[in-house]
Structure formats: C-alpha cells, structure tokens
C-alpha cells in the first residue's frame, strides 16, 4: 500500500471511528456503561479531551488501514468489515481485560460488552476504509 492510500485510510478510519464511537458510547450506551462502572470514583473528566480522543481514533484508523491493506488481494467491503471487526474485537478484548485486572473503572459486564460493541465500531470503520481507498487507483507500475 502506498503512503497516499495509507494516509487517506487512516483519516477516513479515524473520522468513522470518532463519529461512530460518539453514537455508540455517548448516545446509545452511556446509561449502560454508567450503570456498570466499577467502584472507582472521580475518574471521568467533566469535559473529555477531544484532541486526545481524535488522536487515539487516528491511531486505530491506521491499524485498521494496515490490516485491510496488508492482504495480497485488496478486500471487498464485506471483507473489510470482517477484518475490522476481528482486529477491533481482539484489541479491545485485550485492553479491556488488562484494565479490568488493574483498576476498578468498570465491572465485568462492561468489560465483556465493550469488545462486543467494538465488533460493530471497528467493522464499520474497516468497511468504510476499504470503500474509500478501493476507489483510489492503484499506483502505476514502474518498468525498466
């Protein structure tokens, strides 16, 4: 994958993750995660640092772009969803259980639910990345 496709995929993936993350965790499941918090108090910021969230989403967009772009044959949109879903699930399953093991921010129910929601979150992002960078022409082959 060339740098142009990587950068476009990273930005598109980051934007998709950011917007969909807001809809999933702030709009649809905020009450669920509030009800399934751990015993730690005072850990949430009154106003989230949006620059930090955006930077994290760009990083995850880069990971998904690398995952879909590392195939010998460029994936279809459905395959992009599957790759994104698997990568997102595995990343967040690991992160959530490590965090569960070292702090009291979430209970076990939230720890299990979060990676399951990441299947949709990262799956959609993977599909969008494939749809967008798949429309960009392949770099021209250089001949001798």
Image (cartoon, rainbow, N blue to C red):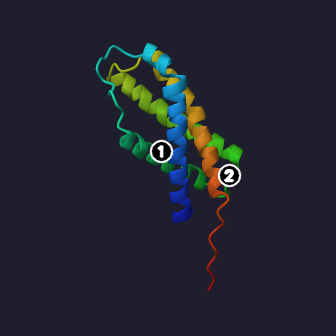
Q: x, y percentage for residue 108?
A: 45, 17
Q: Position of residue 6 (x, y in %)?
A: 53, 58
| Residue found at the very far bottom of the displayed protein | 144
Q: Quadrant of the C terminus?
A: bottom right
Kindly tell me whether residue 69 is visible in this rendering.
Answer: yes
- Whether residues under marks 2 and 1 lie with C-beta atoms below 8 angstroms apart, the answer is no
Residue shown at 50%/33% (left/top)? 22
Location of mark 1 (residue): 60
In the image, 117: left or right of 76? left
Q: Quadrant of residue 81?
A: top right
Total numbered labels: 2
Front residue of 78/55: it is 55
Q: Position of residue 128 (x, y in %)?
A: 62, 47
Q: Residues within 10 Å of mark 2 (few under 14, many from 20)?
A: some
Tag 2, which secondary structure? Answer: loop
Q: CA distance from mark 2 to mark 1?
A: 19 Å
**Which residue is labeled 2 in the image?**
75
Who's the residue at 69% across and 47% down the image?
A: 77
Q: Does dot 1 land on a helix, a strand or a loop?
A: helix
Q: Position of residue 62 (x, y in %)?
A: 49, 51
Mark 2 or mark 1: which comes first in sequence? 1
Comparing labels 2 and 1, the label whose residue is closer to the camera: 1
Q: Residue at x 42, y 44 (%)?
A: 54
């Amino acid at each position: 994958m060339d740098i142009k496709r990587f950068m476009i995929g990273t930005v598109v993936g980051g934007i998709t993750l950011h917007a969909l993350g807001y809809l999933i965790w702030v709009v649809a499941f905020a009450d669920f995660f509030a009800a399934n918090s751990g015993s730690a108090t005072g850990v949430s910021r009154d106003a989230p640092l949006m620059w930090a969230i955006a930077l994290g989403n760009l990083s995850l967009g880069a990971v998904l772009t690398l995952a879909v772009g590392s195939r010998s044959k460029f994936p279809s949109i459905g395959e992009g969803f599957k790759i994104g879903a698997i990568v997102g699930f595995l990343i967040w399953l690991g992160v959530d259980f490590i965090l569960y093991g070292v702090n009291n921010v979430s209970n076990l129910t939230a720890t299990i639910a979060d990676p399951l929601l990441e299947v949709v979150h990262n799956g959609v992002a993977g599909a969008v990345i494939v749809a967008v960078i798949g429309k960009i022409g392949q770099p021209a082959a250089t001949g001798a």
